[in-house]
Image: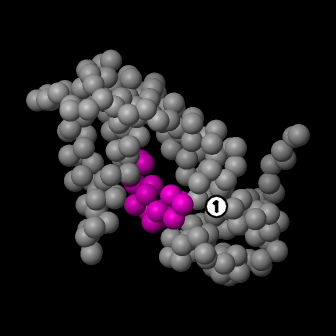
Amino acid sequence: MVTRPLRADAARNRELLLAAAADEFAERGLDASVADIARRAGVGKGTVFRHFATKDDLIAAIVLDRIDGLNAIGERLLTAPDPGAALLEFLTAAAQQRQQRDLSFLQGAGDVNTEMTRVRERMYQVIHALVDRAREHGAIREDITGTDVVLLMCAPNHVTSYLPNPAPDLWQRYLAIIFDGLRPEGAHPLPQPSPGL
């Protein structure tokens, strides 16, 4: 089946809906109503359902949009001349994306379609490739795996969520601490092997 590109107005409405839905879900959780999302986007409910047959489809589209964006960044960085800087740039982009909007509601979204599973698996492949390149060039310690980095990706934003009013860029402090822990200088043996995903 050939997918036709959206007309300019339809594409604009889709982007408005994705942004409005992400904001609405961030504020109200996954129980946010389609009517509220449509109102926030400045469109009718019918427009929502023309783009997304169900609320699950809308949630999946938000997740896909975020992961696709990270995959594009990661794939570009796979050919960067400095693999250590490339890995740090990717982790910075991931943290910035989470900082722009509270996306914790996505954690409960699950794998609502096969496309989401596919792009998430692609993201894991990209992360593993970035980590492998950084390790091979001596930018990170020998015992760090892609799985370790996948598990650490959310940490910079997560730790700041425990503070009542964190500074907007406080996550950068914790990303720097994490990345220093990945470097080979002064590394001590890790007490447990890396888990598999």
Report the residue that reaches farthest toward the top: 136
Query: In terms of depth relative to the viewer, which is nearer, 25 or 99?
Result: 25
189 left or right, relative to 131:
left
* Residue 104 is one of the magenta-drawn residues: yes
Q: Residue at x 88, y 40 (%)?
A: 1
Query: In terms of depth relative to the viewer, which is nearer, 112 or 38?
Result: 112
| Image height of 61 relative to 129, above or below | below
Q: Is residue 87 visible?
A: no
71 left or right, relative to 190:
right
Q: Residue at x 82, y 74 (%)?
A: 46
Quadrant of the image occupied by residue 183: top left
Quadrant of the image occupied by residue 128: top left
Percent position of residue 112, x then y = 67, 53
Percent position of residue 175, x then y = 27, 48
Amino acid under disc 1: Ile
Q: Residue at x 36, y 38 (%)?
A: 149
| Image height of 27 relative to 65, above or below | below
* Residue 83 is one of the magenta-drawn residues: no
Percent position of residue 174, x then y = 24, 52
The boundaries of the magenta stretch are 93-108
Report the residue that reaches farthest toward the left: 186
- The residue singled out by tag 1 in the image is 59
Report the residue that reaches farthest toward the front: 192
Colouring rule applied to residues = one colour
